[in-house]
């Protein structure tokens, strides 16, 4: 349970601009769509994907680090890792299992004989968009587990895009359509309160001290 009185107290320490920002961003957050990156080698690519997720309102990002385990590049992510929830996995199998248990279909972003183009994608289903390694693409394990395959139409000589560019294009398209639909895509009221408290804890440098003092004064 969220202590609403504590939340109200903590908000008095926020600047008016920050409070307005929270009020604006939270209603646009969603877990209807999520993203997974599989063993992306270049650190800036993963960081850029996280940044795109924040920009387009995706609250959770799943990072598979079966081969490559690196810290998020804070400069590239521009602080977005504070506002987006990162779920890290050591194996693709564990990541896919977790997603399936939470009701997501697995969408492999790769050309495939049964592929569908971005314009035809069904936004009504909870979906996780998988992006693979820079040169190798998605593993066979992800391709075998995929419920559908998605591609971005291209008409040039180049047949692929950088994964961070692909993620931005796909997320902009599907989230734009989602917000115009009748799908219940927003975070629940409880999830929004939880996230608000979490963001406050990451904003206030003296958060722990304020909380301790609040409960001490409450007892007295």
Image: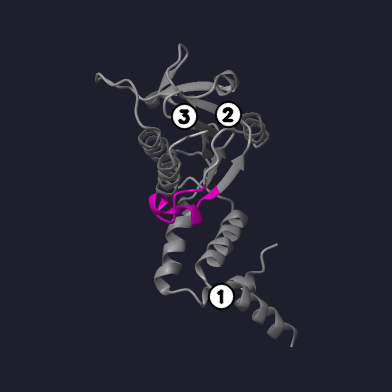
Residue 190 spot, x, y in % from top left: 62, 56
Q: Is residue 199 magenta?
A: no
* Element under disc 2: strand
At 41% from the left and 47% from the top, the residue drawn is: 51
Nearer the N terminus, badge 1 or badge 2?
2
Q: How many marks?
A: 3
Q: Nearer the viewer, residue 160 or 177?
A: 160
> Residues in magenta?
71-85
According to the picture, the residue beneath numbered tag 2 turns out to be: 105
Residue 40 spot, x, y in % from top left: 48, 34
Residue mark closest to the camera, 3 vs 1: 3
Q: Nearer the viewer, residue 48 or 23?
A: 48
Q: Residue furthest top?
A: 113
Residue 25 spot, x, y in % from top left: 44, 56
**Left or right: where 162 falls relative to 182:** left
According to the picture, the residue beneath numbered tag 3 turns out to be: 133
**Quadrant holding the C terminus:** bottom right
Question: How many angstroms separate mark 1 from mark 2 (CA)?
Answer: 41 Å
In the rendered structure, are the residues bearing label 3 and label 1 in contact, judged by CB atoms less than 8 Å apart? Answer: no
Nearer the N terminus, badge 3 or badge 1?
3
Residue 71 spot, x, y in % from top left: 51, 48
Q: Is residue 98 above or below residue 29?
A: above
* Element under disc 3: loop
Q: Residues within 10 Å of mark 3 (few under 14, many from 20)?
A: some
* Element under disc 1: loop
**Quadrant holding the N terminus:** bottom right
Q: Is residue 49 above or below residue 20?
A: above
According to the picture, the residue beneath numbered tag 1 turns out to be: 206
Q: Is residue 89 above or below residue 106?
A: below
Nearer the N terminus, badge 3 or badge 2?
2
Residue mark closest to the camera, 3 vs 2: 3
At 51% from the left and 39% from the top, the residue drawn is: 183
């Amino acid at each position: 349970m969220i202590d609403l009185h504590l939340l109200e107290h903590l908000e008095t320490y926020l600047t008016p601009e920050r409070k307005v920002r929270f009020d604006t961003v939270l209603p646009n957050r969603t877990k209807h769509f999520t993203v997974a990156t599989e063993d992306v080698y270049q650190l800036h690519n993963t960081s850029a994907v996280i940044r795109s997720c924040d920009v387009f309102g995706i609250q959770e990002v799943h990072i598979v680090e079966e081969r490559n385990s690196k810290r998020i590049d804070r400069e590239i992510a521009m602080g977005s890792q504070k506002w987006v929830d990162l779920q890290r996995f050591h194996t693709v199998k564990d990541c896919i299992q977790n997603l399936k248990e939470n009701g997501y279909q697995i969408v492999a972003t790769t050309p495939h004989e049964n592929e569908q183009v971005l314009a035809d994608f069904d936004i009504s289903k909870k979906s996780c968009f998988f992006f693979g390694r820079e040169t190798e693409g998605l593993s066979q394990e992800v391709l075998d587990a995929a419920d559908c395959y998605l591609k971005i139409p291209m008409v040039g000589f180049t047949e692929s895009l950088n994964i961070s560019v692909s993620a931005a294009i796909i997320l902009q398209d599907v989230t734009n359509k989602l917000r115009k639909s009748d799908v219940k895509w927003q975070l629940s009221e409880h999830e929004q309160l939880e996230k608000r408290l979490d963001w406050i804890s990451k904003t206030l440098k003296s958060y722990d001290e304020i909380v301790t003092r609040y409960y001490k004064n409450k007892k007295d």
